[in-house]
């Protein structure tokens, strides 16, 4: 029980120490960063579809991507096998 009380006292002390670091200046800075990077969700001006059509190059691009990936696997086969063995032992 004594250990729990010591841990609680240490935890309280650390929380107070950390809280003292958050002065008005850093709180203002963090709030500014939050406002600048916060995404804006517009629920008033709804999007509308202007046109919808099939991309004629989509299949060619997909086939090219698959071929590139297959070539990558072939070139890096030894490294991939080594990673499989390494992580299989963990």
Image (spheres, rainbow, N blue to C red):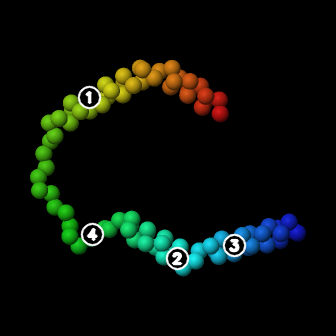
Q: CA distance from mark 1 to mark 3?
A: 58 Å
Residue at numbered disc 3: 17
Mark 3 or 4, closer to the camera = 3
**Mark 2 vs 4, N-terminal side:** 2
For disc 4, the marked residue is 42
Distance of label 3 from label 4 (alpha carbons): 41 Å
Seen at 62% across and 73% down, the residue is 21
Relative to residue 30, is residue 69 depicted above or below?
above
Circles 3 and 2: CB atoms closer than 8 Å:
no
Against 73, is 28 above or below?
A: below
Q: Quadrant of residue 40?
A: bottom left
Q: Secondary structure at mark 3?
A: helix
| Residue to which mark 2 is pinned | 25
The outermost residue toward the right is 2
Residue 34 screen position, x and y as percent: 43, 69
Q: Earlier in the sequence, mark 1 or mark 3?
A: 3
């Amino acid at each position: 029980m004594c250990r729990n009380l010591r841990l609680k006292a240490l935890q309280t002390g650390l929380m107070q120490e950390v809280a003292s670091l958050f002065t008005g200046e850093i709180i203002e800075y963090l709030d500014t960063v939050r406002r600048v990077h916060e995404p804006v969700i517009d629920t008033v001006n709804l999007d509308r579809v202007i046109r919808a059509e099939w991309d004629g190059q989509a299949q060619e691009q997909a086939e090219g991507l698959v071929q590139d990936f297959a070539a990558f696997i072939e070139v890096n086969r030894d490294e991939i096998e080594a990673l499989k063995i390494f992580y299989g032992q963990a």
